[in-house]
Structure formats: structure tokens, C-alpha cells
Amino acid sequence: MKRPLSVREAASMTGKHPETIAEALRRGDLHGGQRVKGGTWSIREKCLEAWLYGKKCKHQIEGTA
Ligand SMILES: [Zn+2]
């Protein structure tokens, strides 16, 4: 299993601004996890991919986010 991505890594992978990624995470458009509230985000590559294509990841669909 791959380790989750940081906001910075997700941004560089998608060519988007880190703030765009962070905003999507805060809005819940992009599914990510935080170990502590206000802490560092970790994003699964699958979830990032779904967001990039304007889709919901399986966690969002299943409500297990
Ligand atoms: Zn997800």
C-alpha cells in the first residue's frame, strides 16, 4: 500500500496550487484525513484522482470518509 500524499505532493502531482488543494480539503470536495484537527492533511492517491476528474471517491460515496 502506498503512503498517503501531503498537500504539497498532491499539488505538485496535479499541477495545482497547494492552496487549491487545501481549500478543496476544507470544503470536503477532496477527501483527505487529518490525524489531528488543524493538522497536516494526508490524501490517498485514489481520492485525489477522483477529485481531479470531478468525481467522488469511494469513501465519499460510501460515507466512510
Ligand atoms: Zn477517499
Image (cartoon, grey):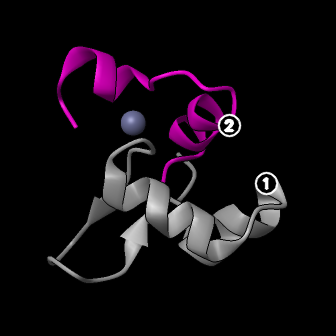
Residue 20 placement (x, y as % from top left):
60, 64
For badge 1, the amino acid type reads Thr
Classify residue 15 as left or right of residue 28.
right
- Quick one: which residue is furthest to the bottom in this view? 39
Classify residue 37 as left or right of residue 42.
left
Judging depth in this view, the residue of 38 and 4 nearest the camera is 38
Residue 46 in the image: above or below residue 7: above
Residue lying at 45% horizontally and 23% vertically, measured from the top left: 56
Dot 1 beta carbon under 8 Å from ligand 1: no
Residue 7 in the image: above or below residue 49: below
- Magenta region: 43-65
For badge 2, the amino acid type reads Leu
User: In what element is the residue under mark 1?
Assistant: helix
Residue highlighted by disc 1: 14
Q: For residue 49: magenta?
A: yes
In the image, which disc is placed on residue 52?
A: 2
In the image, which disc is placed on residue 47?
A: none
Residue 33 placement (x, y as % from top left):
30, 58
Which comes before the other along the chain, label 1 or label 2?
1
Q: For residue 13: magenta?
A: no
Crowding near pointer 2: few (<14 within 10 Å), some, many (20+)?
A: few
